[in-house]
């Protein structure tokens, strides 16, 4: 029995796909082992959102060959689709599979016999038209369920349409089957993932269903305590979705909404499909119907053409919004994107300084949000995360909390009263005993 190990870089979508591909190996009789356990085969699922992700891929290959010098190393994922030839020339790489091929890895490589040169199976991205169902199973507490793939948007900074193809989705019927499979396990929380999940419903190039219909159907699934929406574009997060989540049985009050810039000038240069006024409306609507909702924000600093005044426009815009935390990305040039040829390149030092300013703002926003919740009661899903006699978990509105460790509470949902913030910014709580 050959041993196989997996390593995933990047997003929750990648994690769901790695988990599904690992199950395909196990069904064929391979033994799944830890990365450090001298496997015969390594499968590395890559990301290419930032320049560092590319470098990370090279480092993982190097580490793999140190652990198991005779191993067969396979690279899949976004980086593999974008730069298959470049990856095939990395020392130690034996095969590279693109977006249309990765779920057929076992068919393409069969016996995993080494060749004189790396095997490259990466067709044009236009061939990636099939939707491959995927969900993760490594964590008994939380699962990432893939509902959508690809993107039809043309944001100037983004390589994802080149790496994953056009927008396509599973059917609600198939997703419900996966949800019921997950419900039969110990998993308590499902995170819906995709590239552009608000665009859910495109099958065979035509829109057949909508995201709101999916949310309503999943809300009826018995056996799952929580559904969480991972990230959704502001122009696709309509009032009907927000209002349904506010009164739903299982969808939690947590939204992650990409902004990218608070300057309308930069939003237009980025080719985003909204202006900041719409973003304000979405945040206001969420807070109107769910005052305690957690709202996360993606933002990019140093996009070409972003002056210091444009950045301050973004900084002040976010500072005034009732949002809870930021994911800050420093712009990096990506081949074959529109932005790479734009004028007004921002020096890297300036990009980093702007990112640091926004990360400090994020900490301020997060602390203010946590403090606003002290004294309130929420349910917390406790995880297998025990350190220094404390265990950790997240409330439905995404507050990280801790309480004295009891192994019997792992993967349990408990009602707690929020007490105070510790020095690390984690909420201490008191369990509420329900009579």
Image: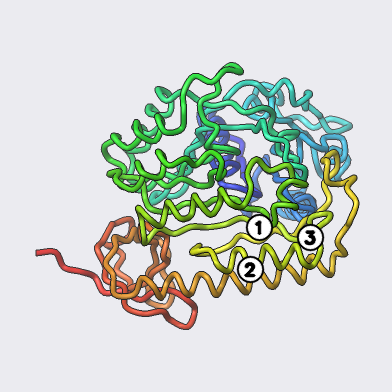
Q: Residue 70 placed where, x, y %?
A: 76, 44
- Which quadrant would residue 111 be assigned to in this image? top right
Residue depicted at 31% across the width and 65% down the height = 407
Residue to which mark 2 is pinned: 316
**Residue under pointer 3:** 302
Kindly report which numbered mark, 3 or 1, lies closer to the viewer in this rendering.
1
How packed is label 1: few (under 14 Cα within 10 Å), some, or many (20 or more)? Answer: many
- Which mark is drawn over residue 262? 1
Image quarter (top left, top right, bottom left or bottom right) of the C terminus: bottom left
Question: 10 Å neighbourhood of mark 3: few (<14), some, or many (≥20)?
Answer: many
Q: Secondary structure at mark 3?
A: loop
**Seen from this angle, which residue lies furthest bottom?**
423
Marks 3/1: CA distance? 13 Å
Q: Earlier in the sequence, mark 3 or mark 1?
A: 1
Q: Nearer the viewer, residue 185 or 392?
A: 392
Q: Reply above or below: 306 against 146.
A: below
Numbered badge on residue 158: none
Q: CA distance from mark 1 to mark 2?
A: 8 Å
Residue 362 at x, y percent in the picture: 58, 69
Contact between marks 1 and 2 (CB within 8 A): the answer is yes
């Amino acid at each position: 029995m050959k041993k196989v190990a997996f390593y995933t870089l990047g997003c929750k979508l990648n994690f769901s796909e790695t988990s599904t591909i690992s199950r395909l190996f196990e069904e064929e009789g391979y033994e799944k082992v830890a990365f450090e356990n001298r496997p015969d085969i390594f499968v590395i699922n890559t990301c290419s959102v930032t320049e560092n992700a590319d470098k990370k891929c090279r480092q993982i290959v190097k580490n793999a060959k140190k652990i198991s010098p005779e191993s067969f190393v396979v690279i899949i994922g976004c980086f593999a689709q974008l730069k298959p030839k470049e990856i095939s020339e990395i020392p130690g790489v034996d095969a590279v599979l693109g977006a249309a091929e990765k779920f057929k890895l076992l068919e393409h490589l069969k016996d995993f016999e080494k060749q004189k040169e790396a095997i490259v199976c990466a067709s044009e991205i236009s061939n990636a038209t099939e939707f491959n169902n995927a969900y993760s199973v490594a964590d008994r507490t939380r699962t990432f369920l893939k509902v959508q793939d690809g993107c039809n948007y043309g944001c100037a900074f983004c390589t994802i349409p080149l790496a994953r193809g056009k927008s396509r989705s599973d059917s609600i019927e198939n997703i419900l089957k996966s949800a019921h499979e997950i419900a039969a396990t110990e998993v308590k929380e499902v995170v819906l993932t995709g590239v552009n999940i608000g665009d859910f419903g495109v099958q065979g190039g035509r829109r057949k269903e909508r995201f709101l219909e999916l949310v309503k159907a999943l809300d009826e699934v018995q056996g799952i305590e929580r559904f969480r929406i991972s990230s959704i574009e502001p122009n696709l997060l309509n009032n009907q979705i927000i209002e349904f989540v506010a009164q739903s049985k299982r969808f939690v009050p947590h939204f992650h909404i990409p902004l990218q810039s608070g300057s309308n000038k930069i939003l237009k240069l980025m080719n985003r499909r909204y202006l900041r006024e719409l973003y304000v409306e979405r945040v206001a609507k969420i807070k109107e119907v769910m005052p305690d909702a957690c709202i996360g924000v993606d933002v990019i600093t140093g996009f070409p053409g972003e002056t210091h005044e444009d950045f301050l426009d973004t900084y002040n815009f976010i500072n005034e919004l009732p949002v809870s935390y930021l994911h800050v990305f420093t712009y990096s040039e990506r081949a074959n994107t529109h932005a790479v040829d734009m004028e007004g390149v921002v020096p890297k030092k300036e990009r980093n300084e702007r990112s640091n300013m926004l990360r400090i703002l994020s900490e301020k926003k997060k602390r203010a949000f946590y403090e606003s919740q002290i004294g309130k009661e929420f349910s917390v899903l406790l995880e297998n995360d025990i350190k220094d006699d404390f265990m950790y978990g997240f409330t439905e509105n995404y507050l990280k909390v801790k309480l004295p460790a009891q192994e019997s509470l792992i993967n349990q949902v408990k009602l707690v009263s929020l007490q105070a913030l510790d020095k690390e910014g984690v909420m201490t709580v008191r369990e509420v005993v329900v009579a």
